[in-house]
Image (tube, rainbow, N blue to C red):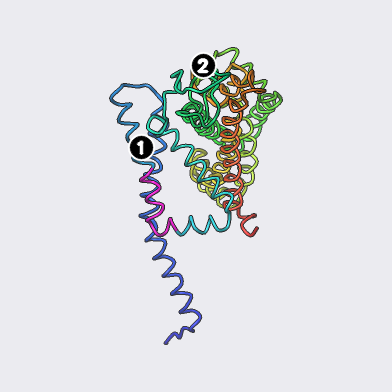
Amino acid sequence: MAVFRTDAAQEIDQDAVSLERARSSSEGPVALLGFTIGAFLASYILSHFDIWPWLDTVIKYIAMISLPAMLLQAVILTPIRSSIVRFSKRKPLAAIGAVIIILAMATDVYAEQIAPYDPQEAGVAKCQQDGSTARKFCGPGTDGSLLGTDHIGRDILSRIIHGARVSMYVGVMTVLIGITIGTLIGIGSAYAGGPVDMVIQRLVDALMGFPPIILALGLMAALGASINNVIIALVVILVPGATRVIRSQALSIKELDYALSARAIGATPLRVMLRHMLPNVIATYIVLMTITLGFAIVVEASLSFLGVGVPPDVATWGSMLEVGREYIQKQSWLVVFPGIAIALVVFAVNFLGDGLRDVLDPRLRGR
């Protein structure tokens, strides 16, 4: 018996075939871009560790090459470019935030190449003060110093550029470790339930009961001032909030049909959590990372401003604010420019986080 298909059915089949072809053609570019992003993030993080001189040099060159390669792929590869264009048209503020974040990370990667001076070099410029030549407290626009010099004659622009290395590194490492740990604990707590879930949540409540800055100050007082200790303190602050958010979503996923079916056919708890629950919280995971990145940068700057964060000989935006606080009435540029750098990055992170939340959350896609 012959089967006749309507024109509408044939059009649906053609659309399905074209959609499948488009998906297959985009898998290669997406995989290539994903590999490049992974190489950049890995080299970006490892470039802040002092391992061996030759290995540090190789890692820095990988970061310096992979960043423009990543951007070039985003422009050349058609599926990626079209997605970026759609996202930019729909969420322009989020796109601007992404550009600012990329520029901040590029400033970190190429700090030694673009900074006009060493951040610790004193007396880099000359200016006239009260009829005499001075090398400190030179204002913005001074010959040899675009943003002026500080109380010992160090270039403000160079210190802001090198300060991005600490602030961006601390922020990225903190959210990467803290949100990842919180996600795993949240999924495990939701799946286990019962007494295990109750004990974990009471510990989370205890940590969330402390004001974040007070908890960070206490940890820094116990651990001492260093970049790694700042990361540890911020991770302790971020884990409870991430655990609570991911747990709330994992509890609903745990009771969905596919998760129940997986358990019914004998899937192990680890497989259910990693194969069925974890992929469905990735969107929330990404949004949490982008939103908390700005918070981590602000807390790191606050700790450096209070003198308990990064050692004072390291150029950071927070330590620049702490130094400029004493001279804010007469040499206001000492706090204005690092403050602008912090504000720009934090606003950019929040804009990007809000945009990603609207795009990745199915309930908000129509807004």
Q: Quick check: 249 above or below 155?
A: below
**Image check: 242 left or right of 65?**
right
For disc 2, the marked residue is 152
What is the crowding at mark 2: few (fewer than 14 residues within 10 Å), some, or many (at least 20)?
some
Residue situated furthest front in the rendering = 131
Residue 64's disc is 1
Q: CA distance from mark 2 to mark 1?
A: 32 Å
Tell me the magenta residue range: 68-81
What residue is drawn where x is 37% and y is 56%? 76
How many marks the image carries: the answer is 2
Front-lying residue, 252 or 255? 252
What is the crowding at mark 1: few (fewer than 14 residues within 10 Å), some, or many (at least 20)?
some
Residue 130's disc is none
Can you see residue 101?
A: yes
* Residue kind at label 1, given as amino acid type: Met
Which is more N-terminal, label 1 or label 2? 1
Q: Quadrant of residue 241?
A: top right
Q: Main secondary structure of the magenta part?
A: helix
Q: Is residue 40 magenta?
A: no
Q: Quadrant of the N terminus?
A: bottom left
Can you see residue 169?
A: no
* Residue kind at label 2, given as amino acid type: Ile
